[in-house]
Amino acid sequence: MKKLRFAIFGAGFWSHYQLAAWKELKGVECTAIFNRTLAKAEALAAKFGVPSAYDNAEELLRKEQPDFIDVITDVDSHRRFVHLAAKHQVPVICQKPMAPSLAEAEHMVKVCRQARVPFFIHENWRWQTPIRRLKKILNERKIGTPFRARIDMVSGFPVFRNQPFLKELEQFIITDLGSHTLDVARFLFGEAKNLYCQTRRVHRDINGEDVATIVMRMGQGTTVTVNMAYAGNYLEREAFPQTCFFIEGEKGSLELAPDYRIHVTTRQGTRAERHAPPRYDWANPAYDVVHASIVPCNADLLRALQGRGSAETTAEDNLKTVRLVFAAYGSARTDRVIKLRA
Ligand code: 89Y
């Protein structure tokens, strides 16, 4: 099969890992990098042996004619680059969160649909090794029908150190982290029927909320609570960036605890397993399980780009996650339960 040639848009913190993860896969090759500051595009290109760097996105598309582009820029520029891809008939992958508002996300999906340009979201959280294992255990019905689940991503890790722009966001933790955790809730328990949310800001030097609590009733009737916090405080069981789960079912319970420990408790007792992610030498140890999950996420997107099936995280599918993100803000603002259309 012919190698697919692609371009990366954006040369910030995340692009280094995204590019390293692409290098783990056969059948794909990065041939150009765009960044509005050329020196940054050149530095990233030099680090990874990518032949060309640009500070003009249209020029890149005209000259390189990539098979697809991978947009890893700040959220406010996603629309511009996705529209550009649609105009040039180039399939596009875009980082989460898709857009700064639901209307903008819907418009981006519509533009690509009308141009018949494949549009995917790089949503990697559900590809984490222990989370794939949880899905398998639930599918095997080891604990029967789940009636309640808690999803905790609560950490004192200084996230703003590596990603200072997160401080500026008026809507922080639900767009940055909730995009992931709400997507995982959908992945494990189906679509939400209703949602209620409360938020808080603990940091004094940021614009958005850094604590959120979301309660949802999911399609199969499961009540799911998503607890998120980046309050910069001290926690005995600090496990950034691991998400912990406690799932109660009619026949047992299932827990994912720090250090990738999975406990399945049924009539037969408790079975303990450990599902650690693969180690990559390019991964930042502080982000291990998250960086490792970029590889299977990219592999899934690549399969679709090669015409070998459909990806899990198409933009059409991700719109359902985006709806939850903005429903959460709506609920927090009005202190109301939001009903969601099926
Ligand atoms: O930006 C976020 C992401 O996508 O993964 C973890 C993170 O870096 C901080 O919440």
Image (spheres, rainbow, N blue to C red):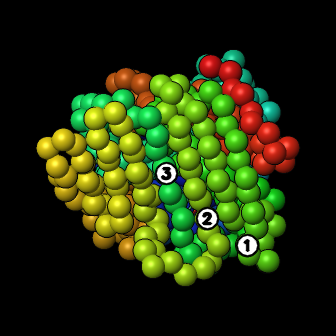
Mark 1 closeness class: few <14, some 14–19, many ≥20 residues within 10 Å: some
| Image coords of residue 159 (percent x, y) | 60, 72
Q: Earlier in the sequence, mark 1 or mark 3?
A: 3
Kind of residue at disc 2: Ala
Q: CA distance from mark 3 to mark 2?
A: 12 Å
Kind of residue at disc 3: Ile
Q: Nearer the viewer, residue 66 or 21?
A: 21
- For label 1, the residue is 202
Which label is found at residue 151? 3
| Image coords of residue 119 (percent x, y) | 58, 31
- For label 2, the residue is 229
| Image coords of residue 33 (percent x, y) | 56, 56
Q: Nearer the viewer, residue 107 or 91?
A: 107
Q: CA distance from mark 1 to mark 3?
A: 20 Å
Give residue 140's quadrant in the image.
top left
Report the image quarter containing ligand 1. Answer: bottom right
Left of 189 or right of it: where is 315? Answer: right
